[in-house]
Image (spheres, rainbow, N blue to C red):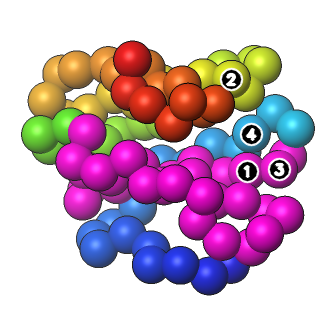
């Protein structure tokens, strides 16, 4: 894999149901979507929480992901549009 990784420790990871991607999150408040097919970072969601991100999970279809952070907020991500909903 190539690309700039997290700037601080990684707290959570989850594999896409199809096995094509990995999503990581950490204390730098960023989520990174890693693409196994191109061996690179497909997208970075920057500063999505005001504190560390403790958990990230793909939906069973892989179309969406959820994150929960130390700020007490849960966020929904559209994996096709690459937007926070």
Could you tell me how far apart the alpha carbons at marks 3 and 4 are, in whole angstroms? Answer: 6 Å
Q: Residues within 10 Å of mark 4 (few under 14, many from 20)?
A: many
**Horizontal side, residue 8 vs residue 66: left or right:** left
Residue holding disc 4: 16
Q: Secondary structure at mark 4?
A: loop
Label 3 with label 1: CB-CB less than 8 Å: yes
Q: Give the magenta-colored segment's residue range.
A: 19-48
Q: Are marks 3 and 4 in contact (CB under 8 Å)?
A: yes
Q: What residue would you read off at disc 3?
A: 20
Q: Earlier in the sequence, mark 4 or mark 1?
A: 4
Q: Secondary structure at mark 1?
A: strand
Res 50 quadrant in image? top left
User: Cα distance, mark 2 to mark 4?
Assistant: 9 Å
Mark 2: give few (<14), some (14-19) or many (20+) Cα within 10 Å.
some
Mark toward the start of the polypeptide (2 vs 1): 1
* Mark linked to residue 63: 2
Which residue is under mark 1? Answer: 21
Q: Position of residue 5 (x, y in %)?
A: 44, 74
Label 3 crowd bin: few (<14), some (14–19), many (20+), radius 10 Å = few
């Amino acid at each position: 894999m190539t690309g700039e990784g997290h700037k601080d420790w990684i707290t959570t990871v989850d594999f896409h149901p199809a096995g094509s991607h990995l999503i990581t999150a950490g204390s730098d408040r960023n989520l990174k979507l890693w693409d196994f097919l191109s061996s690179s970072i497909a997208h970075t969601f920057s500063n999505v929480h005001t504190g560390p991100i403790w958990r990230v999970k793909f939906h069973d279809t892989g179309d969406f992901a959820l994150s929960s952070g130390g700020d007490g907020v849960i966020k929904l991500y559209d994996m096709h549009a690459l937007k926070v909903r």
